[in-house]
Image (tube, rainbow, N blue to C red):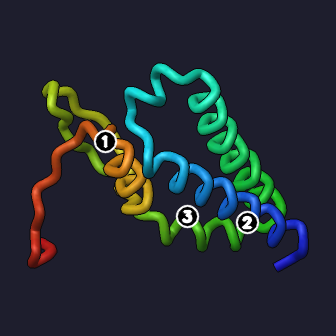
Amino acid sequence: MNPTTRSNLADVLDSCLFIQTTCATRTFDDYQKDRMFRRAIEREFEIVGESLKRVRDDEETVFDSIASCTGGVSRQTDKSGSSGPVATDARSEVTDALMGTHAYSFAHDPIGD
């Protein structure tokens, strides 16, 4: 892995940790009402996206191995009855749960079928 890719991945990790720790003590209502909080979180997501784009452009195999570890996309129905594709990455679901913003319900299947 080249040093630029390593630096970009460090930026991704740093931004994700900031989002997770900052959102852990805040609610979605806080997010909606506090412009500075909202902008800070949105900027961190932009950094994640920009950094991952650079990784994809510089070292596609590294990007592909990251993408293969982050889960898939499935169709799930939210509480209003709408359905659409949603990411099933457990880490983003944890962040949603910490913020109390996850609008989707899941059926637990302990057997895995």
Quarter occupied by the N terminus: bottom right
Residue 109 picture location, percent across and down: 10, 68
Residue furthest right in the image: 3
Residue on which the image places disc 1: 100
Looking at the picture, how far across and down is residue 99, in whole percent?
Answer: 38, 43
Q: Quadrant of the C terminus?
A: bottom left
Q: Is residue 41 above or below residue 87?
A: above
Per the image, label 3 sits on a secondary structure element best described as helix
Looking at the image, is mark 1 or mark 3 nearer the viewer? 1
Tell me the kind of residue under disc 1.
Gly
Residue sitting nearer the eye, 98 or 70: 98
Give the side of residue 56 with respect to residue 79, left or right: right
| Residue holding disc 2 | 9
Determine which residue is flagged by label 3: 67
Kind of residue sitting beneath label 3: Ala
Picture quadrant of residue 89: bottom left
Direction front: furthest residue: 25
Mark 1 or mark 2, whichever is nearer to me: 1
Label whose residue precedes the other's in the sequence (2 or 3) = 2
Q: Earlier in the sequence, mark 1 or mark 2?
A: 2
| Distance between the alpha carbons at the discs numbered 1 and 3 | 26 Å
Q: Which residue is located at x 90 percent, y 74 percent?
A: 3
In the structure shown, which secondary structural element does the residue marked by tag 1 occupy? loop
